[in-house]
Image (cartoon, rainbow, N blue to C red):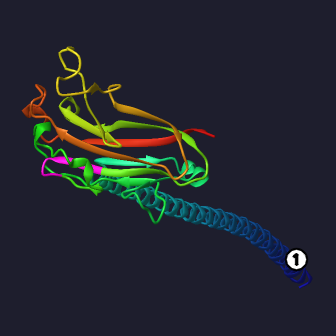
Amino acid sequence: MAENVKDVDKNTDKNFSENTDNTEDTKKKKKKRKKKDDEFDIQNDSQTTSDDLRNTLALRRTAKEAKGYMVWIRILGLIALILIMIVAAAYAISYFYTKFGSFTVKIDKYDMVRQGLTLSETPDYDISRSVLNADIVYNMTNISGEDIPVTVDQINGPHNGMNYIAYTFYLINSGDDTISYTGEMNIENVTKGVDEAIRVAVYKNGEKTVYGKTKSNGGGKEGDCDEAFAASTKVMQTVREGFKSQAKDKYTVVIWLEGNDPDCIDAIVGGTIKFGMNFRITETT
């Protein structure tokens, strides 16, 4: 009986020990499992943080790219607008150049403001002008200088004929000082070699001088001209000294295409030419 009790105690101790061992093993396993779970959670958290960071960076990069794209769109729009404005300005300049530019007279604005030099289409003037524009003759064909009326310089302002440009203006010293001035007429634009057959008559206070380019064969000035052009693009130059206060110089300019010039050929048909006459004060006394 006593042996049985001892066996029972032994079995109980064994079972208790095994249970204890199992409990400790279970605790170790749980602890180990918990550690793995924690490590897994940390890895997940780390992965999540990394993913969040990448997503954040991706969003920032996308926003930056979108902002850069918008900046480029604005820059390209601005460039397009500038180009449109340049083209429009060039068209406007070309239009007015053709519309008003066959013959233009100018004086230096400083000379007008400081010394009273002014331009007018009549001997009496109400306002001072620094620029005058002659009217254009469209589709002008060649004529002979003999076809131009001898009284062409007796009419003020623009008075074109069918195939010639005629313009009369006055240069007036409206200031108090006696001055000296120079005037130059230049070819400012030409196409198709029209200048080879062009003629320019300048009447200064009734005195007429006809200008033209020299013969293309090198034979000197044309027979119907009084003087050859001063240079390839310079028609003439005039000088006036002792131009007193309230004095007036009358100019008439006549431009035509001389049909008797050997260079007046079909090749120049459709050509254009622009002249400019500029005055400036050279001395004040």
Side (left or right) of 185 relative to 255: right
Q: Nearer the viewer, residue 205 or 62?
A: 205
Asked if residue 172 is among those painted magenta in the image, a careful observer would answer no
Where residue 178 sits: x, y (%)? 58, 44
Where residue 45 sits: x, y (%)? 69, 68
The quarter of the image holding the N terminus is bottom right
* Residue 272 at least partly seen: no
Kind of residue at disc 1: Asp
- Which image quadrant is residue 135 in? bottom left
Asked if residue 164 is among those painted magenta in the image, a careful observer would answer yes
SS at badge 1: helix
- In magenta, the rendered stretch is 161-167
Number of other residues with Cα within 10 Å of mark 1, as a class: few under 14, some 14 to 19, many 20 or more: few
Task: Name above or below for residue 96 compared with residue 272.
Answer: below
The quarter of the image holding the C terminus is top right
Task: Name above or below for residue 212 compared with residue 139.
Answer: above
- Residue beneath label 1, please? 13
- Which image quadrant is residue 79 in? bottom left
Task: Name above or below for residue 270 compared with residue 88.
Answer: above
Who's the residue at 39% across and 48% down the image?
A: 105
Task: Name above or below for residue 114 compared with residue 147.
Answer: below
